[in-house]
Image (cartoon, rainbow, N blue to C red):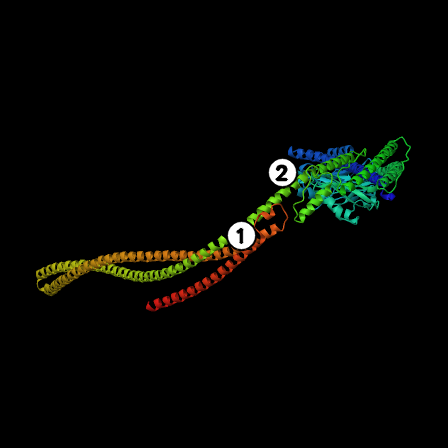
Amino acid sequence: MKKSSSFGNKLLFQVLGTIILVFGLSMFFVSKYSYDSSQEEASNFIQKTAEKYGSDVQNDINRSFLVIRMLKSKFEEALNNNVKLNEEETVSYLKRVLDHNPNLSGLWFKIKDSGLLFETIKDNSDKRLYDKNGEFNPYITKSNGKYKIQPGAVYNENDAWVGGPMKSGKDYITKPYFYPVDGVDTLMATLSLPMYYKGKYIGTIGGDIVLDTFSEMTKKIKVYENGYTFIVDSYDMIIGHPNQKLLGKYIFDVVDDKQDYKAALDASKNGENYIFSKVSPTTEETSYYYSKSFSIAQTDTNWTFFVSVPKEEYLSNAIFIRNFSIIAGILALIIIAGIIILSIRKLNKNLSSISFGLDDFFKYLNKETTNPKNIEIKSADEFGVMAYNINTNVKKIQESIDKDNNLIEEVKVIVNTVGKGYLEKRITAQTDTDSLNELKNLLNNMLKNLQELIGKDLNIIIDTLSRYTKRDFTAKLDSSSCGKIGNEIIQMNRMITKMLQSSQADGMSLQNSSIELTSSVKTLSNNATSQASSLEETAAAIDEITSTIEQTSQKAQEMLSISNDTRDSASQGKGFANETVKSMDEINEQVTAINEAITVIDQIAFQTNILSLNAAVEAATAGEAGKGFAVVAAEVRNLASRSADAAKEIKALVENATLKTNNGKEISNKMIEGFSQLESKILSTSKLIDDVTNAAKEQSIGMTQISDAVGQLDKFTQENAAIAEKTNSIAQETNAVAFKVVENVNENNFDGKNNMKSQTELKKESSIIEKRKEEHTSYKKSELKNDSTYKEDKTFKSQADNEDEWESF
C-alpha cells in the first residue's frame, strides 16, 4: 500500500485542511472585523474633526452676523423713534464693537438719505466721516490695534454688498476678495444686512471679515501624519487651505478630476455631507475625503469643510492588526502542523505494524501460509493493548481452525460413504465453532432421518425401481428394512397393479360401448337429414307469404298517398272558400259606405231644394230685380230633385248588390262546412289505411322472424348432422384408443394379467368395428350428396317463382 493513501496521511490532510480552513476563516473574519472597526473609527474621527472645525468657522461667521444685526437693530430703533444719532458717538460705538469682536476688521453702513439718522454736514465737521456727496458715511477699520477712519464709497446699488441684501431681503455675504491691509493683500469677505423704515428699504449695514484666519486654522489642524483640511465657500472658492497659494482660487481651477468635488459641493448646497476617495493633489496619495456642509447665518447658503487623509495613514491600525493576525495565525498553524505531523508519524508506524500482522493472519486464513507472525508493539498505550489482544485472538482462532479442519475431513469421509448408498455411519469429531457443531448435528440428524426414510442401504430400492421402469411390477421389497419410502414403494406397487388390472377391464368395456355408440349415431344422422328436408319446404312457403304481405303493404302506402293528396285539395278548397267569405265581407263594408254616402247626397239635395225655395221667395219679394235670381233658383231646385232621384236609384241598386253578396256568403259557408266534413272523412280513411299499412308491416316482420327461426332450425339440424358425423368419428377413435389401452396394459407384467379375454378375441372384435365404420362412412357420403342436389333444385325453383311473381305484378 502506498504511503500517500495511508490512514495516517489521510488523517493528516484532513486535520491540517480543517485547521487551515478554520484558521483561514478566523484570520479573515478577525482581519475584516478589525479592519472595518479601524476604518469606522478613523472615519468617525475624520467626520468629528470636520464637524468640530466646521462648527468653529460657522460660529465665527454667525457671530459676526449677530454683531451686525445688533447694529442694524440700533439704527432701525432710532428711525422708528425719530431720534437723530450723533456722528461722533456713532463712530465711538463702532470702535467699541470692533474692540469686542476681533473677527470683524471693519464696519460701515450705506443709507440712501443719511439725513434720516444724522444731521447735515457742518463746516467744522471731520471730513473723513463724509463721502464726496456730503453724506455721513464713515468706513472704520482696525488693524494691529489701530483704527482707521476713511470716507466710505458712495451709496451704489450696483455694489454687491448693497444690491445683494437689497434684492434678497436677508443676510448676505459677498464673494471673497483680496483687499490691502497694512500694505498686504488680505483675503476678505463682506457681511451685510438690509435696513428698513416703516417697511421700506432705506439702505444696508455690514462689516468685513478677514478670511486668512481660516487658513491659519487649517494649518494648525493635525489629521494623522499628512492629512489636511480646507474650506470652500458657496461660490466654490477656497477660503482656507494650508497652501496659501490656493486661497481665493476656484477649486475647479486647481484640481484635475472635478467630478467628485462637484458631487460634494452639490451635496453641500443641499445641506448634505459627502465621502469619496481620490488622489490628493497636495500629497499625491490616494486619500479619503470627507466634506462637511454648514450653513451661514440666514443667507440660505452653505460652506463646505473638507478633510483629506491618505488611506494608508487612517487605515494604518487596521493594516497592522490584519498583518499581525495573519502572521500570528501562520505561526500558530506551523506549530500545530508540526505537532500533528509528529503524532501522525507515530500513528502511521503503529498502524503499519498492525496492518502487516493482520495481512499475515489473513494469508493464514486464505491458506497462503501455515504460521502467522505476531504484531511487535511494546508500548503501554492503546496500540500496545490492541497488538496484545490481536495476537491472543489470532492464536485462539488458529487452534479453532485446526479443530474445524479435522471436523471437515471427517465430514468428507461420511459424505463419500453416503454417496455410495450406505447410511449407517455418523460424524464424531468436536470443534469450538458453534456453527460447525450445529452443522455436524444437522448432518447426523439428516443421516438418521434418511435411514428412517429409505433404510440402511439405498441400492436395494434403486434395483427395485429399476425393474419397475422395465414394466416388471412383480419385484418386492422387505418392509422391515427399507424404511418409510420403501414401504411407500410397496404400497405404490400394489396401487399400480390394481390400476393396470382396472385399465385392462375398462378398455374392454369401452370397446363394447363404442360399438353401441356407433349404431346410435347412425340413426341420429338419418333423422337429422329428414328434418332438414322438411325445414327447407317450410322456409319456401314462408317466403311466398312474406312476398304477398309486402305487396299488400305497398298498395296500402299508395292509397295513403292518394288520401293525403285528397286531404290537401280539400284543405285548399276550404281556404279558397274562406277567402271568398272574407272578400264578400269586404264588399258589404264598401256597400255600407256607399249607402252612407248616398244618404249624405240625399240630405244635400233636400237642403238644396229648401234653399232654392227660399231663394225663389226672396226673388219674388225683390220684384223685377229678382227675376234673374228666381230663374237660377228654379234651375237649382230642378238639379236638387234630379240628384235626389239618382240617389234613390243608386241606393236601390246597392241594396240589391248587398242581398246578392249575403247569398254568396251563405253559399260559401256551406262550401266550407262541406270541405270540413270531407277533410274529416279523408282523415278517417288515412288512419284506416295507416292501420292497414302498420298491420302489414308487423305481419312482414313476424314472417321474417319466423323465416329466421326456420333458418336457425335448419342450421341447427345441419349442425346436429355434422355433430352426429363427428360423434361417429369419435366413437371409432374411442374404439381404437380402447384397443390401444388394452394392448399397452398387456405389455406390463403384473398379477392377474391373464384373467381377462385373450389377445386374439380382441383383434377379432376390432376388425368387426373397423368394417362397420367403413359402411357408415360410405352411407353418410351418399346422403350428403342427395341433400346437396335437393337444395340446388329448391334454389332454382325459388328463383323461378320470384321471376313469375315480378312479371305478373
Q: Is residue 556 left or right of residue 504?
A: left
Residue 359: x percent and y percent?
86, 40
Q: Quadrant of residue 146?
A: top right
Q: Is residue 178 left or right of residue 388?
A: left
Question: Disc number at residue 199?
Answer: 2
Position of 535 relative to 435 (above/below) = below
| SS class, disc 2 | loop
Q: Please name the amino acid that badge 2 sits on.
A: Gly
Residue on which disc 1 sits: 511
Tag 1–tag 2 contact (CB < 8 Å): no
Q: Is residue 467 visible?
A: yes
Residue 315: x percent and y percent?
82, 39
Q: Please name the amino acid that badge 1 sits on.
A: Gln
Q: Which-is-in-front pick, marks 1 and 2?
A: 1
Residue 119: x percent and y percent?
69, 36
The mark nearer the N terminus, 1 or 2, is: 2
Crowd rating for badge 2 (residues with CA inside 10 Å; few <14, some 14–19, many 20+): few
Q: CA distance from mark 1 to mark 2?
A: 155 Å
| SS class, disc 1 | helix
Crowd rating for badge 1 (residues with CA inside 10 Å; few <14, some 14–19, many 20+): many
Q: Quadrant of the N terminus?
A: top right
Observer-nearest of 24 and 784? 784
Q: Is residue 247 left or right of residue 504?
A: right
List the single residue furthest toward the top: 380
Q: Quadrant of the C terminus?
A: bottom left
